Image (tube, rainbow, N blue to C red):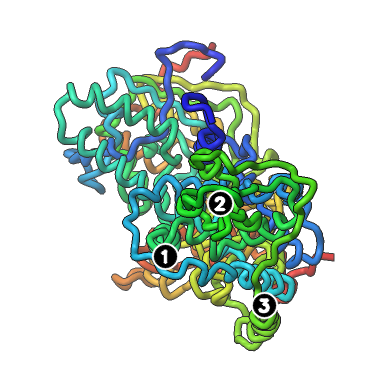
Amino acid sequence: MKKNGMTLRHWRRLSQALCFILFIFLFIKTDYSGSNEIPYAVNILFRIDPFLAASASLAAKALVSLMWPSLIFIGLTFIFGRFFCGWICPMGALLDGAHRFIPQARPGNANRFRTFKFYLLGFLLIGAFLGLPLTGYFDPFSILVRGLALSVYPALNVLTVSFFTFTYQQMPDWVNMLTEPVYSFLKATILPFQQNHYHLGFVSLFLLATIFILERLERRFFCRNACPVGAFYAITSRFSLMRGKGGSSCGRCRNCISVCRMDAIDENRRISPLECTLCMDCLDLCPGSKISFGFQKKDLTRPGFGLSRRTFIGSLAIGTALPFVLDTRVMAQRADPFLVRPPGALPEKEFLGRCVRCGECMKVCIGNGLQPTFLSAGLEGIFSPRLNARSGYCEYNCTLCGQVCPTGALAKLSLDRKHATKIGNIFFDKNRCLPFAKGIPCIVCEEHCPTPAKAIQFREAMVLNNQGENVLVKQPYVIDERCIGCGICETRCPLPGKSAVRLTSAGESRNPGNALPNQALPG
Amino acid sequence: MKSIKDKRLAYYHPDDRKFIPVNIERGKAVNRLEIYRDALEADTYINVPVAKHHSLSRLTLGLKNSMGVLGGNRGSMHHNLGQKLADLATVIRPKLTLIDATRILLRNGPQGGSLDDVKILDTLVASADPVACDAFATTLFDLAPDEIASTVAAYKMGLGEMDLERMQIIQA
């Protein structure tokens, strides 16, 4: 190897860095930028993921056409092996970058969990097919984007804004001459459009952090042992054309074995294409230059997976059995009435099957209305998006969530179709609503109601107020046929605490079983 | 914005750090509001409302449009709105009010409505007197100035004229 030039290892690092920057760029661009249009393919990371493509297609019982880019990467893996994990994956790049800052625990038996990822992959895919949607809890990009979107990125904004608020309010003018342009620049570039607030921020942060904590046990612990995308690529790589060839007649220095981040090289210096991510470290560090990568015609013996047949069948059996347990719960009979799904959401089962819990829709939501669900959609529904209308609403003239959804769990709607898509219906709590309960005039809900002919109307009524006087007030009521469930009335209700107008999923277009008494069924 | 191509021109989303509490000395219904700093400190403040229907104030004109510089709990403005808008007008004093009545929204405002609710007038109403400007613009909706509570309250506080007879109305 040349000493001064760019070696393959350096090219790999450059590729990792560029892919990571691209990933962060697209992440930042997953935001409102002044128009109801997302100009970049911000969800591309999920759409090239063959594991998610397989699970979404299995759940939908049809090929999900949005996911076609994953085929490119499956094809490339047949040629080059598991290069994605070493050269492209932003999670891998982060782990490699962070590795030196994570103190190592005492080395244990490294190969203990090696096959776990294959069992997990089998379990997840058969579960996806039979209706157990758990893929989003193990897919590395779901974990990464969700952790960044719901926790890290909003926290970065809190930190930055607090700092510049301090300088703005407490520092002399000459300091502000320096800091304010920096703040304006950050706001125009890397900071979010607005400060969003999310449920489960800590949980998503903790899940992301776990992957880094596991790095203490061994390098790329998650990639070696758990990552279902890695498992998918490993299976594909078994048939790949390009292979690393180790030194069988070398000086036995074991440099390659100890340097390999995936522990892909065995005692006889054979490189397993299942685990090798083509990071090229061994190639550059082998003192005898005995290691090479190439398309070897001979020696195409396929390595085994080292799987226990019994355990693999067991994991498939669990994936087969668990979906039937889901239907024993009350929510299979009657869903939580406050579980309101975003516009364009498929019917619930299909929606949960396709949703990969990536959090992109929540990040892009202008009204900060979409929140990760906790338990109201069951254990398998955690992190799926719902509209929490008290803390945020669905903007009438916005279709961004459907534009960023990588799997079509939220359909991409035209604005006209969005306006005609009912996600729920409101009702008034007359015990709290001011004109009913206290004879105090208030029209805020009607004022904000965005439908062309307002869904909230008034009746004038003479009522006794708390002083015992007869007063004429406007009392609001809802016209169900006009309400599309955007929830802005609940968000804007000026009462402290619980709103006097509540949004429920009643009448949602996607579920005829949830129709209102007088609702015409879509024919 | 872009077609004007002048670097001195800029527009901003409101910056949350810039709302400052202001005592409303002459206020009858409200005595303290959080107001956007730029609106208080600007050399010249020009108010450019789009004339439209509003379910509580009946119309959104100049005085109602000034709510745009408020931070804090804006929902609390809605009780006794007319007087509170007049109170706000004691501290937010535009040098010019320019009411955009090129297309006015007659019903289902301020949000909602459809093109059927829009009437095209191709009219701009301008005045250095914010109350007079609102009073005249009210007539475009076939309403009388005294039907708008904020106009009446501001007139009574001596913030401007609402009697159309006493205005010099110039049509260009």
| Mark 2 to mark 1 CA distance (whole Å) | 17 Å
Q: Disc 2 sits on a residue from what chain?
A: A
Q: Which dot, 2 or 3, sits closer to the camera?
A: 3
Q: Which amino acid is tagged 3? A: Phe
Q: Disc 1 sits on a residue from what chain?
A: A
Q: Which dot, 2 or 1, sits closer to the camera?
A: 1
Please say if A375 is above or below A390.
Answer: below
Of residues A483 and A211, the one drawn nearer to the viewer in this rendering: A211
Q: Are marks 2 and 1 on the same chain?
A: yes
- Along the horizontal axis of the image, is A437 left or right of A343? left
Q: Quadrant of residue A466?
A: bottom left
Q: Pick the quarter of the image with the C terminus of chain A.
A: bottom right
Q: Which amino acid is tagged 2? A: Glu
Task: Give percent across and percent down for residue B18.
Answer: 28, 35
Q: Find numbered disc 3 in the image and state the secondary structure of the residue it sits on.
A: helix
The residue indicated by pointer 1 is A203
Marks counted in the figure total 3
Q: Which dot, 3 or 1, sits closer to the camera?
A: 3
Q: Which mark is residue A312?
A: 3
Q: Which mark is residue A360?
A: 2
